[in-house]
Image: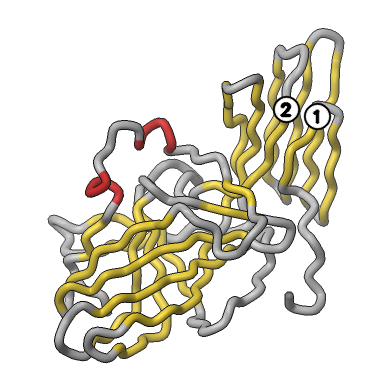
Amino acid sequence: MTEGYQIFPVYGRYGYDLCIEKGDLKICFSRDGDVVRYSRTLGDSTMERIIASDGGRVIINPVEPLNLPDEVTRFLEIRFESIIIEPGATRRIYLTFPIEIGVFISKKAAFRCIDIFSRAQPKYSLYGPTDTGVITRYHWSPLSLALPAPDPCCEGVVELDIVNTTKGWVEVSRVVLENYGMKIYYDGNLVSIKAQMRVIKSTIAETCCIRSPIREGMRKSIELYYTRTIGLSESALTFTMDAGVH
């Protein structure tokens, strides 16, 4: 872990008596008679909620970075320094992605997201032609060959296996991931996604996220899009990048 980063104290599971402060971020739950009051400030952004609940849990974890300021897109596009991969080879690289944080309340098996916030200012791009392309949440990332250690309050890590199934050299400088099937794992100092990119032609690839942490002991985040993926086939969880990989 990079020197200077401390274990991020926000992620976890709590009771309703909770108050967390870290820099300009403050999250508080407090009882007020028969209700629970929730308040959150982050810079100039604030959120307040009134919750009618006798008992339950609070869960704070990173969520799919595709919710703020609104659900503009289902796609996350990460651009990075290009890498050239030989025919038939598989190479593992590490990228960063922007983090959004969800605050959930739960009782038994029922969950409700009451707040989402982020330190990352969202940027958007267009992947593909103007008439048939898709809007993406855009993020520029350095390319690392070893696991990096970004601030878990701001950025997570994508462990990406690029599989060149072609008989030629391919150059790759971007990956697009869809929220359906996106699996986020976290612990005290790392937020991560594991993904695969299969290059099937020099300009076409298939991408998917993998249900597995990149190291032992990580906890799986609650998925905001979980209920929407019920009943989807495995092919629906794969995105085809047909507008280029570079």
Residue at image coords 50%, 40% = 223
Figure quadrant of residue 35? top right
Please state the horizontal and vertical placement of residue 235, each as a whole percent of the image: 22, 49
Q: Which residue carries the number 2 mark? A: 57
Residue most toward the top?
34
Figure quadrant of residue 111? top right
The chosen color scheme is secondary structure
Label 2 with label 1: CB-CB less than 8 Å: yes
Q: In which quarter of the image is the N terminus?
A: bottom right
Q: Is residue 211 left or right of residue 104?
A: left
Q: Name the residue nearer the viewer: 232 or 120.
A: 232
Residue at image coords 38%, 47% = 181
Judge whether 205 appears above or below 227 on screen. Answer: below
Judge whether 235 appears above or below 136 on screen. Answer: above
Answer few, some or many: residues within 10 Å of disc 1's Cα (few below 14, many 20 plus, some between 14 and 19).
few
Please state the horizontal and vertical placement of residue 102, each as a whole percent of the image: 61, 41
Residue most toward the front?
216
Real-space CA distance between mark 2 and mark 1, rounded to the nearest whole angstrom:
5 Å
